[in-house]
Amino acid sequence: MKALVQKFFGSGNRRGILSMITAMLLFTTNDVFVKLSTEHATSGHIMLMRSGGAVLIIFMILLIKGETRQLKLSLDRNVLLRALSDLIATLTFVYAIFHMPLPNLSAIVLGSPVVLTACGALVLRESVGWRRWTAVCFGLAGVLLIVQPAGESFNVWSLLAIVCLFGVVGRDLFTRIVGISVPATVSIFSACLVMTLSALVMLASEGWPPLAPRELIYLSLSAIFMTGGYVMSIDAMRHGELAVVGPFRYTGLLAALFYGYTIWGDIPNDMAKIGIAVVVGSGLYILHREAVRTRAAKR
């Protein structure tokens, strides 16, 4: 028992857990400010303010860490493909959040560990046993319960949420392929720069409608919280074991449910509640099986 407690709450894992919880709270708060700004801000506004602000902040971090010479690695093909996947995920998320309740959208996107497991087996030829395949099937069924393709709430925005999910999975797949050869800050900088350039293209067609001070404040705060989330998630992965800190990613869903109810009065219907529980349960089981496989490989 003492060894188990030390494994989960030793100095490294304890820091990793706290960093992951902080990261998810920051990311979800960023989503809240994005949704609050959708009353007057366009998608181009949102993309530029969030990504442009993140580019400046991350570049300062690169300067402080002395990693600016590593920026040439941004031209690596897999880093660029990761940035493209992140762009797809961000674009579809921004468009979907205009029209979807935050808890439902967050729950769909948090199905990424489930889909990532399947893609890891099909694309990277990773070994996936029948238990994890069963969890994948249940997880996908949970996503369908949230989306409810046969229900009245199903529309094009639900489809965008699914595309966002696969964008997140693509980003994580290319993150695995890139590995530790490229600093995480460089990968994040590359993705945010691609998003910033895309936002400028969007604004060239949308124009620049004037924003009220309130929207400018919301989007500035969004950029700060998003960047903080990136930094804390990197810290979580560097100091804690993936199997230990990974499950705490779902604290973001609890935050989304809280924000959705207190700010907009959003309450998922009964089918969506069941779907959310199934997605979370499947994701946690997949992370558990990954921990089991890791321990077995070390013996």
Image (cartoon, helix red, strand yellow):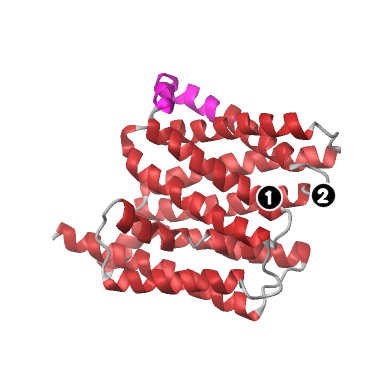
Find the residue positioned furthest to the left.
299
Residue 248 vertical placement versus 88 (above, below): below
Question: How far, Cα to Cα, is label 2 from label 1?
Answer: 13 Å
Lateral position of residue 251 relative to residue 187, left or right: right
> Element under label 2?
loop
Residue 238 in sight here: no
Q: In the rendered image, which quarter contains the C terminus?
A: bottom left
Task: Give whichever of 278, 252 is nearer the camera.
Answer: 278
* 60 falls in the magenta region: yes
Residue at (71%, 74%) from the top-left corner? 152
Write down the residue under mark 1.
95
Q: Disc 2 marks which amino acid? A: Glu
Residue assigned mark 2: 39
Q: In the image shown, does 269 or 25 lie closer to the viewer?
A: 269
Q: Position of residue 42 (x, y in %)?
A: 76, 42
Q: Is residue 42 left or right of residue 25?
A: right
Residue range highlighted in magenta: 57-75
Closer mark to the observer between disc 2 and disc 1: 1
Q: Quadrant of residue 257?
A: bottom right
Q: Residues within 10 Å of mark 2 (few under 14, many from 20)?
A: few
Q: Is residue 69 rendered magenta in the image? A: yes
Mark closer to the chain start, 2 or 1: 2
Percent x, y of residue 224: 64, 39
Q: Looking at the picture, does residue 176 appear above or below residue 284?
A: above
13 up-or-down from 62: above or below = below
Density class for disc 1 (Cα within 10 Å; few <14, some 14-19, many ≥20) is some
The residue drawn where x is 26% and y is 68% is: 129
Q: What secondary structure is the stretch in magenta mostly built from?
A: helix
Task: Tell me whether circle 2 and circle 1 mark residues in contact (CB < 8 Å).
Answer: no
Q: Is residue 55 visible?
A: yes
Residue toward you, 256 or 120: 120
